[in-house]
Amino acid sequence: MRIRILALLAVIASLMAVAAPAQAITNGVPDKGAHPYVGELVLYVPSREDPRFDDPGYWSTCSGTLVSPTVVVTAGHCAFDVGHNGEDGSDIGGNDVWISFAEEPDFDILRPTSQFAPDNNGGRYQDWSKALNSSNEWIRATAYHHPEYIDGEFFKHDLGVLILSKSVTLKKYGQLPTEGLLDELYAENKSQTYTTVGYGLEDSGPMTGVGGDTRRRAELKLVDLTGVGGRGGGTSAKFSSNADTGGTCLGDSGGPIFVSGSSTIVAVTSYEANINCAGTTGAYRIDQADDLAFLATFGVSS
């Protein structure tokens, strides 16, 4: 079962030529336990339309990285307008978001949308939130986005945080970067590789989606630090993939981009150059002073 942010793509149609937020690993490989601190998010946005229903209320998925027992780093657009007990949670932090750290999260606990559409979106929320709350796998959280995040210009401050309702104890967690780390790495070695991890689609097109909802990884190279197509210069970085090493697609949003061979996150997956996930990733850098200061308010640091 896949719950994707496809409806969001219509909202940002004016950006489609250069950027589409909420993107998954294409042509990568199964993670096989390499990154147990990367999880899949399921979130509910009460203000967003679902074309299958007569009233608003939209479910979608993203990816994120546990950087402490209770703190997850994700994209800002994955933490924006998340509901709070089914209502608007934008002013207080939305708690209608859950995360699983399983390699293949269990979506079978959610009854098919067709059993609720078109006139019972409220019933779907009650049913799904109850199932997720009752699950031993899915952990409820509260979402917060960068204080300067604006949905229409998501690529400028595309950073979000989840605070888990219960701790997750692991031997290792994702690590935050030092300030300006990506600049240093790019200056020292332009052949440096990076590992992206996420739960998104393995292939995508305007009317199609293949795979998804399993943790996969792929290798990328940093192309430049000026964003993609003129978007996000100074805050976003352009990474490229190829048919051999894979890249990102729908559902990978918020997933980490690590310095290969390490658990250090230099960026989160933010946007794609096109809906076909054709090899170019716009990644939001988290090694900037304002981002590290935002994360520090949640008790995490480099």
Image: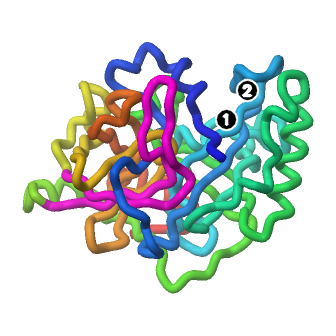
- The answer to whether any part of residue 51 appears in the image is yes
The answer to whether residue 293 shows anywhere in this view is: no
Q: Is residue 243 left or right of residue 268?
A: left
Q: Secondary structure at mark 1?
A: loop
Q: How far across and down, in percent of the image, does residue 247 sit?
A: 32, 48
Give the percent coordinates (x, y) of residue 54. 82, 17
Q: Is residue 35 left or right of residue 97?
A: left
Q: Residues within 10 Å of mark 1 (few under 14, many from 20)?
A: many
Callout 2 secondary element: loop
Write the residue at 35% across / 28% down: 274
Residue 145 image-quadrant placement: top right
- Magenta highlight range: 192-221
For residue 80, above or below residue 16: below
Residue 40: name its quadrant. bottom right
Calculate the distance from the C-alpha at mark 1 to the C-alpha at mark 2: 7 Å
Q: Tag 2 or tag 1, which sits nearer the N-term?
A: 2
Identified by mark 1, the residue type is Asp
Q: Quadrant of the C terminus?
A: bottom left
Q: Which residue is mark 2?
A: 47
Whole-percent x, y for residue 72 in the image: 56, 61
Answer yes or no: do the residues labelled 1 and 2 have beta carbons within 8 Å? yes
Residue in the picture at 34% in, 19% down? 17
Amino acid type of the residue that numbered disc 2 sits on in the rendered structure: Ser
Rendered view: 282 above or below 25: above
Q: Which residue is mark 1?
A: 81
Q: Report the colour scheme.
A: rainbow
